[in-house]
Amino acid sequence: MLAVLLFLAGATASAYCLWQFRRWLQEAEAATAARPRELERLTDELLATAEMTTAVVQEKSEVLQGLIEEADRRVATLARREEQPPAPVIALQPRVDEPPVTPEVVAPPLPEPVVEQAPIQPEAPVPAQEESRLPVERADMPVLHQQVLALAAAGRDEASIARELGLGRGEVRLILDLRRKA
């Protein structure tokens, strides 16, 4: 009996091993049959990816080609500009035979100074020292200058002359200095 039991145990183990081996073979055959389908799927995915990549590269290539053509046109335009003779330079300085053009400055009119005509007193004799500094009145001398010189000859100082004629002290001084040097 023990031999029968051992025989049955061995037969059962052998049957189980055969069954497992057959199952393994069927799975291997199924996997082998599925491999081509899996390879076809992977190949299709690779082809689709390659087509998309090709389309993107083609689009970028067309854009790049357009940019290169635009750059070539601009370079050609610049080359044509360099070949042209330079534009004449406009002189900013006036020609010698033409007077310089100065812009007109329009200032608001100044109120005329109120000059009270004081009776002109007979001229006092001018001391010899003053006489040499002041020139004799001339017909081409402005009336204002004549008035300044007359008051100075009468012994008035610059401040009182300026006040009386409505001038500035610097203006009176300038008139006197000009006439002394003349």
Image: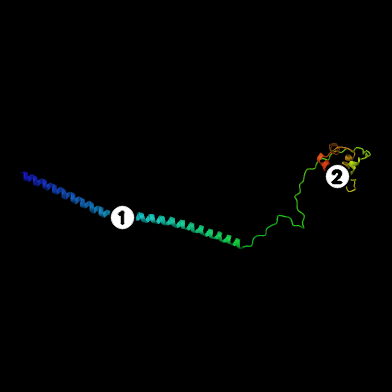
Answer with mark 2 or mark 1, whichever residue precedes in sequence.
1
Question: Are there few (<14), some (14-19), or many (20+) residues within 10 Å of tag 1?
Answer: few
Report the residue that reaches farthest toward the front: 129
Q: Which residue is mark 1?
A: 39
Q: In the image, which is nearer the foreground, mark 2 or mark 1?
A: 2
Give the x, y percent position of residue 19: 17, 49
Task: Answer yes or no: is residue 168 visible.
Answer: no
Q: Of the numbered discs in the image, which one, if any, rests on residue 59?
A: none
In this rendering, would 44 be left or right of 133? Answer: left
- Residue 29: percent from left, percent from top: 23, 54
Q: Amino acid at mark 1?
A: Leu
User: What SS does tag 2 mark?
Assistant: helix
Q: Quadrant of residue 55?
A: bottom left
Q: At x 44% / y 58%, what residue is drawn? A: 58
Q: Position of residue 141 (x, y in %)?
A: 88, 47
Q: Is residue 79 above or below residue 162?
A: below
Helix, strand or loop at mark 1: helix
Location of the N terminus by quadrant is top left
Residue 173: in sight, yes or no?
A: yes
Depth check, front residue: 36 or 136: 136
Callout 2: few (<14), some (14-19), or many (20+) C-alpha neighbours within 10 Å?
Answer: some
Residue drawn at x 85%, y 43% as measured from the top left: 176
Q: Are marks 2 and 1 in contact (CB under 8 Å)?
A: no
Which numbered tag is attached to residue 180?
A: 2
Q: How far is disc 2 from disc 1 in space, using C-alphas?
A: 119 Å
**Amino acid at pointer 2:** Arg
In the figure, is residue 78 to the left or right of 139? left
Q: Is residue 56 left or right of residue 99?
A: left
Please state which of residues 119 and 26 is positioned toward the viewer in this rendering: 119
Residue appearing at x 53%, y 60% in the figure: 72
129 is higher (above) or lower (below) than 52: above
Residue depicted at x 6% and y 43%: 2
